[in-house]
Amino acid sequence: MNKNARYLATQALVRVHQGGGYSNAVLDLLLSDEHSENTMSSADRALISRLFYGVLERLLTLDYIIEQHSSVRIKKMHPVVRELLRLGCYQLIYMDKIPASAAVNETVKLARSMKQDKAAGFINAVLRAVERHNGHLLDNLADDEQGLSVRTSCPVQLIRLWSSDYGDDMAVLLAESANQTPPVTIRLNTFKIKQKEFEDILEKSAIEFTKHPFISACYDIKDVVGLKRLAELPENCYYHQDKASQICCMALGAEPGERVADVCAAPGGKSLTLAQLMENEGEILAGEINPSKCDAMERRINLAGATNIITVVRDASKPCPSALIGKFDRVLCDVPCSGFGAIRRKPEIRYKPIESFASIPELQLSILNESANMVRRGGVLQYSTCTLNKAENEQVANRFLSLHPEFSPRILPLEDCFLASGGQPSYQITLFPPIHGTDGFYIAGFTKNEETAEMR
């Protein structure tokens, strides 16, 4: 492995933990750097991602192990030394293909090249100690929530939240699934290519795929790098979208010719999927509060060939404009949230204090309240998040119903999902990674009553 790969992984980790940046944004910025593009192989770039995300995923486990073999507390270490130790330990414990000697020696060399000469001996001693005890590093952990926290690298606070909301057994499953690599799921853009043609190309190229049993145009891909290199595929003929987001679009039930609003639409994936389900007929109003994100969404929509989507810069939590009141058959509110359902993709989310998200339910309810005004009589309103937190999910949905007698619960058309979780069809459902194979996700549906739908 090019030593530059270890350097960039360390640099990215320092930026995330010192600057508070989101992992995907930090890494994308580093990997798009002109120097990196010109000097690094695709294998090294893949290894940077593995090291970077691996350390983030296993942070609590790594810190526990380091402190068991160090005379210096993690919080007292220099930021670069801290990340180097984490990086070295991750290679020793989780990367069998990297020789232990290389994991230790290259980390020590990197410390010197990053102006941490005085810490080089310390780093060497800690990593050598970890190497000696590898295989028994977690033997002394208790079989309790603290032990579960260290083993899965999920904070106790988050485990307790899940235990309270979903029960102890589910909390264990969620913690254990947090470090599993999510499948690479794509949505075929049926405006550019038909499913049969797509499948024929993949089979001819020996690229393994799994077609979803009940979501149309949805595939899990084994070799995503090979998929990107297929010259036979038309440009913009697929996009990455987790199954949960596609299920959310299915649940809305939008049909050709209808008028639909996607009020928190960026980056535009759900609007694109809805456009396909509507066969490019009717109208989708895709709203986004950030002008630059709205511009990017419009470019993406145009490249995809969707012609029934109109983008607009709008704050969905603010009073609904009179021109939009009662004008839509279906309104989708996929709102900002804490993101606890997407931990497999953004591992650093798990470490954010739960209390830092305390104000989010009020924003979510505001968006839902204002979006309710957009729905015509007999129309559909749908609420969703990518989090696993009842304060942002069921509690918001129940508060909405108590405030809006003009709306009734709408049974979601997701029979297969309810069957997988052993529940009866309802107006709300939580999708769990260990049960549904999706990101963690919540969906609730409402219908505006024909006879009592008075505007507030």
Image (cartoon, rainbow, N blue to C red):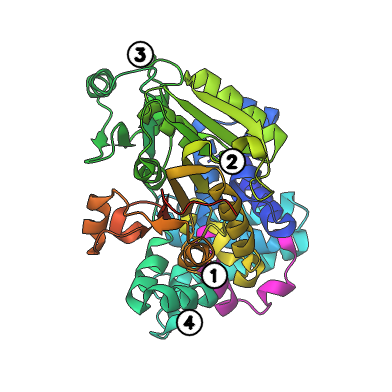
Left-right relation of 250 to 128: left
Number of the label disc, if any, that sits on residue 325: 2
As for residue 176 lying within the magenta part, the answer is no
The location of residue 19, given as percent across then percent down, is 74, 55
Left-right relation of 79 to 38: right
The location of residue 331, given as percent across then percent down, is 49, 42
The answer to whether residue 100 is visible is no
- SS assignment for the magenta stretch, majority: helix
Bounds of the magenta segment: 56-80
**Secondary structure of the residue carrying numbered label 2:** loop
Left-right relation of 285 to 162: right
Q: Amino acid at mark 2?
A: Ile
Mark 4 closeness class: few <14, some 14–19, many ≥20 residues within 10 Å: some
Mark 1 closeness class: few <14, some 14–19, many ≥20 residues within 10 Å: many
Number of the label disc, if any, that sits on residue 232: 3
Q: Earlier in the sequence, mark 3 or mark 1?
A: 1
Q: Earlier in the sequence, mark 2 or mark 3?
A: 3
Dividing the picture into quarters, in which one does residue 107 lie? bottom right
Foreground residue among 238 and 69: 238
User: How far apart are labels 2 and 3 at the CA level?
Assistant: 46 Å
Residue under label 4: 146
Is 235 located above or below residue 29 in the figure?
above
Left-right relation of 416 to 42: left
Q: Amino acid at mark 4?
A: Gln
User: How far apart are labels 3 and 1 at the CA level?
Assistant: 44 Å
Q: Earlier in the sequence, mark 2 or mark 1?
A: 1
Q: Amino acid at mark 1?
A: Leu
